[in-house]
Image: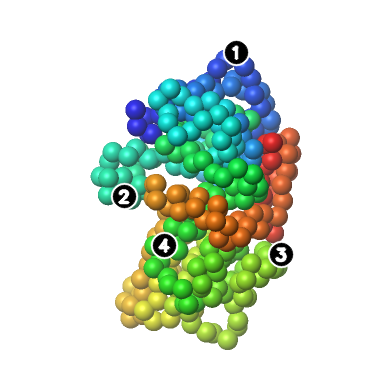
Amino acid sequence: MTASDHGAANASPWRADVTVRAAVLTEPGALSVVSVPEPSCGPGDVLIRMRGTGLCGSDLAVFRGERRPPRLPWILGHEGTGHVVEAGGEVSGLHSGQDVVIEPDYCCLTCDACLAGRTSACGGRAAVGLTVPGLLSDYVVAPAAFVWPVAPRLAPEDLVCAEPATVARAAMRRSGIAPGRSCLVIGAGSQGLLLCQALIAHGVTVFVQEPNEARLGRARSLGATALPPDGRELPYLFETSGARGALEQGLRRLARHGTAVLIGMDTSPLDISPRDLVAGQITLVGSLIYDHPADFAQTVRALEARTPARLGAVVSDGYALEDVQKAFTAASTAAGKVWIDLS
């Protein structure tokens, strides 16, 4: 069975005789903590006791009703860490008690895109929390191929950042930026902060544009510099905010022959002429999530090598599962990353 088969066939692999807590979206803007049947572990699966789940922009889009889940009620969340409780009979390399992080995009591994190493373009990809139920639950089941063991005793604040840090590192890889170069990062939400962190660890000088003073201050604490108002042009641009008009603003600060990497999901038309792109010889790169398995493997290695020293330095607020409504309400303006402590 492929990963996408798993997501389709086992969207609700529950054991009806045992219940656990989960946070479910009941309608846009409304979350409740309820009892749900405990998931059961298939032969190629791993049952995980969750320690923490991070919140990101795609979670907030579903919460606010900007993106429709397959059904309601719906379990959100895709940035998760926990420890293995049970491994299926066909699983090797994972065992009870291991600390793990979950790679929450289950590509099919068989289509042309997957076979070419571009799993982010897999048409059969199951996205946890978006197309299959999410990780805001005491226990979850995941296909073993997408469960990564990590060194014991790493802080959950670091581990809940593993998935979005992989998004950031994949964007950096796709940009081709080399150490010693400089760039502009637009947006210092949790994704922008993790990108600043990755770029700085890579030896890049990072300028950041962010209207939220608390987020700008956190970016500065990581080593970024506020964008000077002098009109200086930079050779690389990373747009993470998805805010209307932000990309156009950034392109005006992009040097000739520059590269712009688009990460934020703005749906409005782009107000720029092809002539400007051609005359500036601009390269546009769309960076969607990451590619399995190399990108996640590199993040896990960086986590364990503590490069950067603490992914969790971008975290500003933690909440108990019972306070999940407060967490989602606060996340859109929080100074850093928000996470749910499930321990």
What is the CA distance from the residue labelled 1 to the residue labelled 2? 41 Å
Tag of residue 34? none
**To which residue does mark 4 refer?**
173
* Mark 3 vs mark 2, CA separation in Å: 38 Å
Question: Relative to 207, is 212 on the left or the right?
Answer: right
- Name the outermost residue toward the bottom: 230
| Closer mark to the observer between disc 3 and disc 2 | 2
Type of the residue with mark 2:
Gly
Q: Are marks 3 and 2 in contact (CB under 8 Å)?
A: no
- Classify mark 2: residues with Cα within 10 Å, few (<14), some (14-19) or many (20+): some
Residue on which disc 2 sits? 117
Q: Position of residue 311 (x, y in %)?
A: 60, 56
Which quarter of the rendered picture does the C terminus lie within?
top right
Between label 1 and label 4, give the one nearer the viewer. 4
Dot 1 falls on a residue whose secondary structure is strand
Q: Is residue 23 above or below residue 265?
A: above
Residue 269, above or below 142: below
Image check: 127 left or right of 73? left
In whole angstroms, how far apart are the C-alphas of marks 3 and 1? 47 Å
Structural distance between the alpha carbons of marks 2 and 4: 14 Å
Q: Name which residue type carries label 4.
A: Arg
Q: Secondary structure at mark 4?
A: helix
Q: Earlier in the sequence, mark 2 or mark 4?
A: 2
| Disc 4 crowd, CA 10 A, few/some/many (<14, 14-19, 20+) | some
